[in-house]
Amino acid sequence: MPAYWAEKTVAKTVGDIPRDIVDDIILVDDCSKDQTVETAKALGIQVHRNEKNLNYGGNVKRCLQFGLDSGADIVILLHPDYQYTPKLIPSMSAMLATDFYDLCLASRTSGRGALSGGMPIWRYLANWGLTNIMDMSLGTYHTEYHTGYRAYSRRLLEGVPFHTFRNDFIFDNEMFVAALRGGYRTCEVTCPTSYEADASSIPFKKAFIYGLQCLKLSAKHFFWRVGNRLSK
């Protein structure tokens, strides 16, 4: 769990994690100035705190590495703000446990999960538009690429150089593109969401920059695909 100012929601998130299939719960705090670390430690989970703020991608890298170091076969990336329900962990894990898939996305826009959960309409439309452009560019089909709720197989995490990717919000999609280029299979599940007052949300300016990064990343992969076809 990559945490940043999650004091008010981390206990609720951890409380819904199905302990019967989860071996380790690891939280990495990115220099929050609230009581996230103290609250998480009181829950009896493994807690780490970054010495300096690493930004979203940098924090996720540490989360994934701690997951690998713990010996996990499947690592679930779950934000502790309770925007995503932890109750989907068994479903996402089952998709990867078949050894057919290596990356599972929890999609907020499959069905009406995002709108019924309170996602702002401008964010929903931007998500939908970017996703459709990325579908065409990446040569695959998913109903969302912008979720922070993801499951990774150990095989994928050991096969892509994720520590070399960017430290900002585009990190998740750099991971996705690396999976595609490596021949790893991807899938998704439908995820209900909850946009409560305590849930974190990316500011508009950062969301705009992220959108431009998605377009640039998608264009690069599109031309990579075209180049591969022409070289055959």
Image (tube, rainbow, N blue to C red):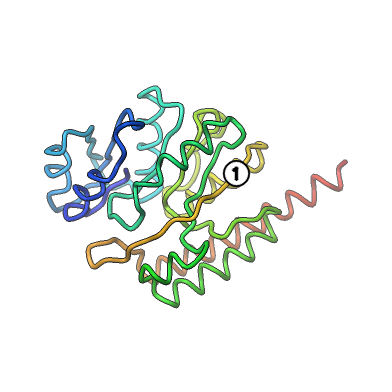
Q: Report the front residue among 231 and 2.
A: 2
Residue identifier under label 1? 186
Quarter of the image with the N terminus is top left
- Residue situated furthest top in the rendering: 71
The crowding category of the residue bearing disc 1, from other C-alpha atoms within 10 Å (few below 14, some 14 to 19, many at least 20), is many
Q: Report the front residue among 29 and 97.
A: 97
**Residue 128 position (above or below residue 141):** below
Q: Report the front residue among 172 and 79.
A: 79
Quarter of the image with the C terminus is top right
The image shows residue 22 at horizontal and vertical percentages of 34, 32
Number of marks drawn: 1
Left or right: 198 with respect to 96? Answer: left
Q: What's the residue at 26%, 48% (across, down)? A: 13
The image shows residue 114 at horizontal and vertical percentages of 43, 66
The image shows residue 5 at horizontal and vertical percentages of 21, 54
Left or right: 64 with respect to 195? Answer: right
Left or right: 218 with respect to 161? Answer: right
Picture quadrant where residue 160 is located: top right
SS assignment at label 1: strand
Q: What's the residue at 47%, 42% (across, down)? A: 92
**Residue 68 position (above or below residue 194):** above
Picture quadrant where residue 134 is located: bottom right
Left or right: 13 with respect to 191? Answer: left
Residue type at mark 1? Thr
The image shows residue 151 at horizontal and vertical percentages of 47, 41
- Residue situated furthest bottom in the rendering: 121
Q: What's the residue at 35%, 68% (across, down)? A: 203
